[in-house]
Structure formats: structure tokens, C-alpha cells
Amino acid sequence: MTYVRPPIRPLPPRPSRYGVDPKFVTRRMADLPNMTSVLLEDLFPDSPKVLYPGEEGIQAIRRATESAMEHMDLSMIQPGDTVNVLASHHGFTLLGGEPYAEMLRTVYDVVKSRTGAKEVRLRAGVGLRFRETEEYIQRFELKKYFDRALGMAPIDEGIPIETEIGTLYGLKRAYDADWIIHVHNSDVREVHFHRQVDRAVKPFGMSYARIETRSTYHQNLGPRAANFTARAIFESEFVQSKFAGAVFMNMAPGGVVSIEADNDLYRINDTVMYDGLRYYGKVFHLLGMIDECIVGLDFPCPVPYVFSAGVIYCNFVGANVDLFDLSVKLPPYTWYTEALYGKDGRPLVPDVPPVNPAIKMVVHNYAWIGYPSAFFAEHLPTIVVGTKQAEIFEHDPQNLEYMKYALIASNLDEAMAFTYRTTGTDKVIAFDGAVGGINVSVSLAEDLRRLAPKASREVDTILLPKWLKQRGLSALAQEA
């Protein structure tokens, strides 16, 4: 008889202006009967060894960051200079946020001790939830650590940056120091947008940019085409005159693999693009093999960003195509894709790929507002658990139509009873941020174990070589 693992405890609800009070999240997907967990290292024995989480705890992040920064030249920073440590909100959603916060603290300590800089400040960018990084700064007490710390929103005062393609706009507060250090992570996150191209450069056109410039990325040029705007900003004379280096938390689906630090952002860029493809590719491919399932949203993030096995929900919505394959012109979900649907909900052109047909129903147990998500409820049958959660979506300016397409259930058990009866399947996958594995129903766990060897072979022999060749990274793979 096959041993059935207990579910992995999901990340707990988090107090936020963007979600319901945690007291209203009374039951989690992992608490449902017939739920189990599958460890990533059991599915893929060649999964990379992670340094966090691990026996050393958070100290592993500090040790690895200090070690990586030993090879980073900081001699350009003089005593009396000011330094902005540039961060992004997404790092705080990984593994509870503590590893990213600890990396930021360590960067502060190293820069202060090695350079004698007058001020080392934290400047943390964000997307459409303008106060989100302020919540993280408070949660991790970063104002007490940095000389100054503040969150930046894309509607804050801008600064013109002359680039080889014309004037683009960054955030003034990102660049109001003598030097900048770009501190980010390699998690593939919005691969439906960036397509794992220039992954390390992306924040210069996003987290550190004004909304007019970052909207080029989302709406004007579409996936594959917009990445050059971030590169143009980064390579501008203005940014290069301030750029001291970068420090990255290099991620795999199971946790933090390494800390990368360098004065050459493009060296880090090649590393994180390559590692992202080989670490996440097998999980993506395996999830794309699921034939039918019920999705449970159960994580403190907006709807598209809830996690399962290191993959965000909106990437599972597009898992019926290969999101890493650059010959795939259009993912099933991006804002650009949304614009190709008419008011009747039908595609305006014939080659718009549908959302993942394996998703039979979505149970929205816990997820935040702050990102336009009506597309998901419109295209996938959705049940929202609890009137409190439904109310905040009905009053969110970005989600005024979300509840137009969704049903409301009084509690999770009621939602699941309806879902099982309606869909005819008992296969469940929870997007709940479980670390090191996936919380799924026993029936889906059996499917994943059976399909994983095939997924692994196909990525190793066919898909990974293609992905690398498309990005000019084949030589890097041969060196490794």
C-alpha cells in the first residue's frame, strides 16, 4: 500500500488591507478530507538542493549573501555617499518573506561595513497594490534597520531617462541616491509576460518605473516584445552612472538555491534565466499534463499570484501551452490576451488560445484583491468562500465584475460539496504556498507520480535544449 503523506501546512493568512481579516479564514484546502502532499524531490529526484528552508534556518541566507558579496566590487561607493537598495514586493511573498528580508538586511550590513556610506536606504517597488511594500516594511521592521525605508508606487513622481529608443520614465525615489544596488529574486513568477527573457533586468521597466512606461510591458507590445524597454532603461547612461551591482535570491520550486551577487547584471541574468528553465521547467510541464482538476486558491496574494509548487495560478491557467517556448506567440492569459476578447467573452481573432481546459472549477478560499482578476472568474467557473471575501471584491475598483461571474458559498465544505457534484472529479490541487511540495488530493497525487518520469525525460531531452537555444544559452548549459 502506498504511503499517504499528510498535507504540508500552508502559509498562514496575513493581515492586509488587500485581504479579509485572517479570522475569517477558518478552514484551509489542506484541511479537506482525502488531501495529501507530494514532495518535489520525490517527483523529480534531480531537484536542486536548497539552502533555505533547511537545518541552518535563516542564518543560511545571511551566510550565503555575505559570501556572494565578497566577490562584488564596492570600491566606487565612497564614505559619505548615499546608496539606494532597490527591492520589489514579490520577494516578500516567497517562503513567507523572511529570506528576502534577511537578504536585504545583509546587503545593508555589508555595504555599510565595507564602504562607510553615509546613508543606505531601502526603496521597495510594487505593482498595482500601492501600499503593499509598506506593509512588508512594517512587518519585517525594515525602517528600524535601514537608514531610511519606503515603498514606491508606479504613480509616484517620475524622472525622465534618456534611452536609445527615446525618453522613458523611472521613479524619482529609486534614483535619488549616488548609487543603486538592485536586489531581487529569480522566481519565474509572470513567465506569461516576460517569457523567461531578461529576467534579471525586468524590474528596471517594472518595479522602478513609472506606470506609463511599465504599461508598455503589459499592454502595448505584448509578451516577448516588451522586454527591451527594461533593457533600454538599464543600459541608459543615467542608470549606468549609478549602478553599483546586483544581489539575487536564486530560486527553485523547493526554495532558495543560492545567492548570486555581481557587478555585471548580465552575468546574473544568464544564470537566473538558465536556472529558471531547468529548475521550473519540469514542474511546469508536469502540471500541464493534468487532465482534469479542481483548483483551490488559498494564499495571501492576489488571485493570479497564489502559489503551488513554485508556480503561480495564472501560469497554471496557461499550462495547456508551453509558456517557455518562444515560438508560442500568445499565452492563454496576459492583459494583451484579454484585449483580444470581445464584450461577449469570445475571441476577436481565431488564434487566441483558450484557458487551460483541465481546470473544471476554481474554489476561491483565500486570495487578495488589488489585481484585475475578472478574466479568471469569467473564463473559469469560480466559487468564492464567504460573504466577507465576496464583499471586498465587489468594492475593489480593479475587480468590480469579479463577483458578477462567481458564486458565493457560506464555507469551504459547502463549496467543495457543490464542486465535486458539479464537476464529477475528485482531483484537487491547492495553490496555498506549501513549501517543498504540492498539496493535492490522493487521486491527483497518483497521477502526478505516474506522469513525473515522462515529464522529466521530455524536458531533459527535448524541451530544455529548445528553450536554451531560443535564448542563446546553449553554451552555458554545456559549461555546466
Image: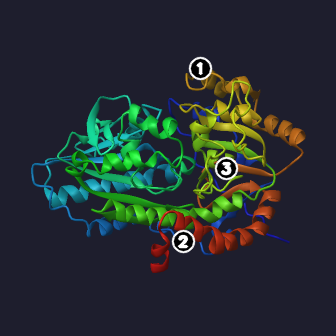
State yes or no: discs 1 and 3 in contact (Cβ < 8 Å): no
- Between the residue at mark 2 and the residue at mark 3, the CA separation in whole angstroms equals 22 Å
In the rendered image, residue 422, in percent from the top left (x then y), is placed at 88, 38
Front-lying residue, 413 or 198: 198
Q: Is 339 placed left or right of 454 in the picture?
A: left
State yes or no: discs 2 and 1 in contact (Cβ < 8 Å): no
**Image quarter of residue 146:** top left
Label 2 vs 1, first from the N-terminus: 2
Secondary structure, mark 3, is helix
Q: Is 3 placed left or right of 279 in the picture?
A: right
The residue sitting at 59% across, 40% down in the picture is 334
Q: Give the residue type that dot 3 points to.
A: Phe
Q: Is residue 203 visible?
A: no
Q: Is 111 placed left or right of 327 in the picture?
A: left
Residue 407 to residue 75: above or below:
above
Which residue is the site of mark 3? 316
